Image: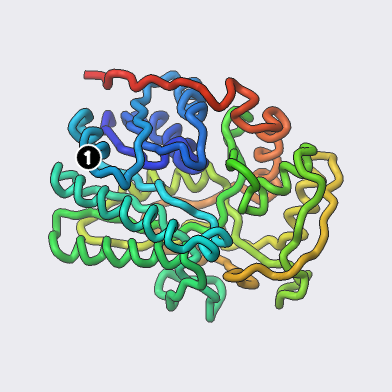
Amino acid sequence: MDKTVLVTGGAGYIGSHTAVALLERGHRVVIADNLANSSAEAVVTVRRLTGREVAFHQIDLTDEDALDEVFAEHPIESVIHFAGLKAVGESVTAPLAYYRANLISTLNLLNRMQHRDVRKLVFSSSATVYGDPEQLPITESARTGATNPYGRTKLMIEEICRDLAASDPRWRISLLRYFNPVGAHPSGEMGEDPLGVPNNLVPYVMQVAVGRRDRMRVFGADWDTPDGSGVRDYIHVLDLAEGHLAALEHLESGCEVFNLGTGRGASVFEVIKTTENVSGRSIPFEVVGRRDGDIATSLADPSKANEALEWRADRNLEVMLRDAWNWQSRHPNGYADKVGDDVDVPTPTPPD
């Protein structure tokens, strides 16, 4: 295919797996990431797994001049936009940081894309835009109403993209509302490596299993669910990466939204039990109070993406957690076990 794709946030968890999928499909990849919650070693791993070169720019998208230099240096034809802050709980306590990072960075990106006549975009949205759903499973036509600042930034960006596409038919935009990405590359060399205390369930469970943390906290066991713990639609990160490629390859004029999920739910207690099975380790836990902004159940109806994008999430919860454990058990401290946090990743000259 030999198309150049800019992947913002490409050193992050989903971005790095998507970069691998793009390279394996024959695309050229440029990564832009500020490394605020990621590691440059992920870029090294992308190169190692694919045997392909990747251009890397350590920039913050709130710096529009630095972003413009990336567009000036590479023949970018499309963008997959992951960059942004993403923790629900943190967004409740630090809303201004989320509005600044997520909204300003996206406005800068869209400005630079328009200036450079790059009008193909796949945006990393989230199921959090649905808030507390009125019906399950959730379809794309469901009422939106995010219950936390993180979700509201995603919803605001979706509206910006719709307005942009309505203003100019040359824009082709897919908004991907995905549910709960988990798992890792089956090689065990790439996975989720949050800096500090994990905000998401599975990396926390894995750090308990590997001995980095002493116990799990279960935020409420009195939800209206079969076992009282929160239920989520978990999707393997490789299925999710393939969903981004499918969206990129099916871009049409205008702005379209798709759910990416499995349509199957798993509770917190199910995740803990399955992790114990795949790891052979006991996972101690304690039940604590609910978190602000949480909901009981979130479950996707992915049928629109199944049909329109010819895409389907096939990997089940056991595969997801087995791959996550394979990564965590090989690298108990994440990418720091590979070369350390001070890895230098030079920006290569893009191929002719």
Which element is circle 1 on? helix
The residue located at (42%, 67%) in the rendering is 152
Q: Is residue 34 left or right of residue 5?
A: right
131 and 147: which is toward the camera: 147
The residue located at (72%, 75%) in the rendering is 223
Q: Is residue 144 above or below residue 272?
A: below
Residue behind mark 1: 65
Q: How many marks?
A: 1
Sort mark 1 into few (<14), some (14-19) or many (20+) by Cα contacts within 10 Å: few
264 and 151: which is toward the camera: 151
Q: Is residue 159 above or below residue 6?
A: below
In which quadrant of the rendered view does residue 90 lie? bottom right
Q: Quadrant of the C terminus?
A: top left
Q: Is residue 98 above or below residue 278?
A: below
**Name of the residue lying farthest toward the bottom:** 134
The residue located at (59%, 38%) in the rendering is 193
192 and 70: which is toward the camera: 70
Q: Horizontal and vertical percent for residue 148?
A: 50, 69
The residue located at (45%, 43%) in the rendering is 242
Task: Give the color scheme: rainbow, by chain, secondary structure or one colour.
Answer: rainbow
Q: Horizontal and vertical percent for residue 192?
A: 59, 40
Q: Quadrant of the N terminus?
A: top left
Q: Horizontal and vertical percent for residue 321?
A: 69, 45
Q: Horizontal and vertical percent for residue 86?
A: 49, 54
The three-letter code of the residue at mark 1 reads: Asp
Q: Is residue 281 left or right of residue 259?
A: right
